Structures are given as structure tokens and as C-alpha cells.
């Protein structure tokens, strides 16, 4: 009996050891692999809302694995999307529509990230409303592009004929526009951020009284649009093919991007430092002044479709080519 019990004990002991070895040899469970998402952002206001997300990705705390590419020219963002070197890109809204048409509907707009960044500056103190622009010479860049149409729309809605009641003086680019304001050549100018902050900083450094920010064109648009549209100048688009193949990654991006925009708005000093670090705005001091005037936002879904489609209709009315010769179909607006 003792021998039988000894044998049975030995067998049970061996079985336990073998079971333990078997458990130890099983591979440990691995965390789910992150989806790589290639994102192209544009330096300036369109890219500002991305900087907190860039920082978190660098820290390795994001749901997706982001590969960021910062460009200076919107056409570089277009090339990245069309050549499939980017999955998501931040671009001007009218350019998003143009890409949609040129690529036979291969992109969708995910969310609007920037309202208007245009402001009326005055070297003086005579303007308190749009009505006060009557009889003025207004300097601006962007002839045949969004800035011209925004200015015309706001003037017309306020009963001012852009071709008779004011003189619109177009300059080649925003650097020339900045110079006109700083030197005093332009008494009145419509200037985008961050050039607004750059103008005022340069004037202060030269011992001049900085030009006053007298009108926010986003607010002026809102006053006359009757909720039919909003001045929405920047957005993020996604390759439709990527969105269909990676719906969870796209939803994660939208959540993380909205959080990033909120973080930028909540802590402008930290965001300004990140803007300089990642090259979105060259100097943190300029970025800190510019961010509050960049009208950063996050609008998606039905609200985005209503307000953005209304804005594109306004542009289409001035120049069909400005949005790709046609209004985009409903499928252009990503609904998840």
C-alpha cells in the first residue's frame, strides 16, 4: 500500500510540475498594435490646434501612432493626400472641396478646425463698425481667393458696394501686407493671424503705436449670415479609402484632435511654446498673441455640414473655381 501511495504521489507531483511548465511557456499577451496615421499639417493657424497632439504622440500616450509632416504651402498638403503619403491633412476648406472634385470624391472632410483668422487693422481710431469702412482704402492680400470673397460678402451684407463705396488695394502676399501696415502706408488693412500679431509686435519694437484690431471678420460674418453659414476657413480631411479601412483609428483621431484643440485654447502659453518647438509658428511670443485671435474650433457631423456647406455656397457665388467648379455632394461630409 505504501509503495502504491508513493507511486501515485510521484505521478501527481510530476503532473503538477509539467502543468506549471506548460503555463510558463505560454507567451505573455501583447498590447494591441497602434494604427499608424500619417498626418500633414500646415504651418500657421491651420496647424496650431495640432501641437498638443504632436506632443502627446512624442510622449507615446496617444491611441494611434501618428507620423506628422509639417508643410508651409497648402499645395504640399494636396500633394501628400493625392499621392497617399498622408492619410489625414489640415487644409483650407475651399481647397478641401477642390481636392474632392479633382480626385473624384476620394477625400472627406472630418472636422472644421479654424473659423476666420481675418481681422481689420487700423492705423488710427476711426473704425468701430463695418459701416465705418465706407470711403476707406482697404489693403489686403488674396485677390481671387478666400480673403477677397470674405471681404466682399461682409461689405455687401452691410450695404456697402465693394467696387464703388471702398477702394480695395491688393498686395502680392501677406509679407507685403505686413510691410504696408508697419510702414504706415496702409491706414486700413484686412490681415490674417499670425501676421496681425507680427505687425503689432514689429510696430511696438520700432517705437510706433501698434495698429488697432478694430473688426473680427468672423464675428462680422456671423452677424449677417442668419445662421445659414459660418466663416470656416480651415479643416482636416481624410482619404476615404483610409477611413473605410480604419474607422476606429479615425474616431480615435477625432477624439484626440478635439482634445488637442481644447488644450491649446486652455493654455496658450504652453501651446505657444509647442508652436515654436514644432515650427507651426516661428516664435512663441508671436504665437502667444496670435492664438486667441485664430478662432480655433472643432465642429463635426451635422453642424459642420450645415455651416460649411453654407460657406462654400457663398464662395461658389463669387467664383465657382474657388471650390473646384461645383458644390460637393453630401458624402463629402464625414459622418462616421
Image: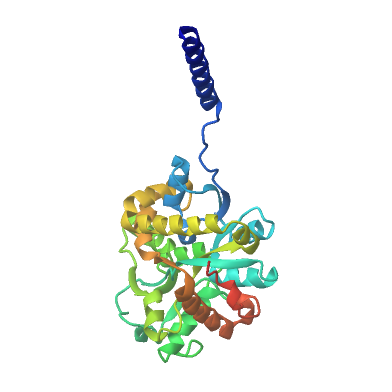
Above/below status of 289 relative to 314? above
- Is residue 264 visible in the rendered image? The answer is yes
Instruction: Give 56 or 32, whichever is nearer the viewer.
Output: 32
Instruction: Give 104 or 128, whichever is nearer the viewer.
Output: 104
Furthest residue to the top? 3
Instruction: Give 6 or 335, whichever is nearer the viewer.
Output: 6
Residue located 30% across and 80% down the image? 128
- Is residue 71 visible in the rendered image? The answer is no
Above/below status of 234 relative to 327? above
Colour setting: rainbow
Percent of width and height locating residue 4: 50, 11
Above/below status of 183 relative to 165? above
Residue located 40% across and 68% down the image? 184
Total marks drawn?
0
Q: Quadrant of residue 33?
A: top right
Percent of width and height locating residue 185: 43, 70
Percent of width and height locating residue 166: 45, 85
In this image, 215 relative to 174: left or right? Answer: left
Residue located 40% across and 56% down the image? 259
Percent of width and height locating residue 26: 55, 29
Q: Quadrant of residue 268?
A: bottom left
Furthest residue to the front? 1
Q: Quadrant of residue 291?
A: bottom left
Amino acid at each position: 500500500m505504501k509503495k502504491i501511495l508513493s507511486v501515485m504521489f510521484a505521478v501527481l507531483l510530476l503532473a503538477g510540475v509539467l502543468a506549471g511548465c506548460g503555463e510558463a511557456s505560454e507567451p505573455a499577451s501583447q498590447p494591441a498594435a497602434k494604427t499608424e496615421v500619417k498626418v500633414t499639417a500646415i504651418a500657421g493657424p491651420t496647424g496650431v490646434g495640432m501641437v498638443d497632439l504632436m506632443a502627446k504622440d512624442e510622449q507615446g500616450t496617444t491611441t494611434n501612432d501618428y507620423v506628422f509632416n509639417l508643410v508651409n504651402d497648402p499645395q504640399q498638403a494636396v500633394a501628400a493626400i493625392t499621392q497617399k503619403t498622408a492619410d489625414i491633412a489640415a487644409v483650407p476648406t475651399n481647397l478641401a472641396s477642390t481636392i474632392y472634385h479633382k480626385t473624384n470624391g476620394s477625400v472627406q472632410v472630418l472636422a472644421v478646425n479654424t473659423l476666420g483668422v481675418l481681422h481689420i487693422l487700423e492705423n488710427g481710431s476711426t473704425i468701430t463698425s463695418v459701416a465705418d469702412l465706407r470711403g476707406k482704402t482697404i489693403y489686403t492680400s488674396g485677390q481671387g481667393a478666400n480673403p477677397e470673397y470674405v471681404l466682399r460678402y461682409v461689405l455687401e451684407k452691410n450695404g456697402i458696394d465693394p467696387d464703388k463705396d471702398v477702394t480695395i488695394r491688393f498686395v502680392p502676399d501677406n509679407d507685403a501686407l505686413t510691410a504696408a501696415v508697419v510702414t504706415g502706408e496702409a491706414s486700413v488693412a484686412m490681415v490674417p493671424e499670425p501676421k496681425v500679431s507680427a505687425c503689432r509686435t514689429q510696430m511696438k519694437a520700432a517705437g510706433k503705436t501698434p495698429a488697432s484690431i478694430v473688426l473680427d471678420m468672423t464675428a462680422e460674418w456671423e452677424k449677417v449670415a442668419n445662421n445659414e453659414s459660418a466663416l470656416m476657413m480651415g479643416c482636416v480631411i481624410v482619404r476615404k479609402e483610409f477611413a473605410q479601412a480604419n474607422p476606429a483609428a479615425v474616431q480615435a483621431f477625432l477624439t484626440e484632435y478635439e482634445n488637442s484643440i481644447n488644450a491649446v485654447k486652455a493654455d496658450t502659453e504652453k501651446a505657444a511654446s509647442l508652436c515654436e518647438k514644432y515650427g507651426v509658428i516661428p516664435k512663441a511670443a508671436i504665437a502667444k498673441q496670435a492664438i486667441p485671435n485664430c478662432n480655433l474650433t472643432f465642429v463635426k457631423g451635422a453642424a459642420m455640414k450645415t455651416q460649411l456647406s453654407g460657406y462654400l455656397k457663398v464662395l461658389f457665388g463669387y467664383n465657382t473655381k474657388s471650390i473646384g467648379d461645383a458644390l460637393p455632394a453630401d458624402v463629402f461630409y464625414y459622418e462616421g
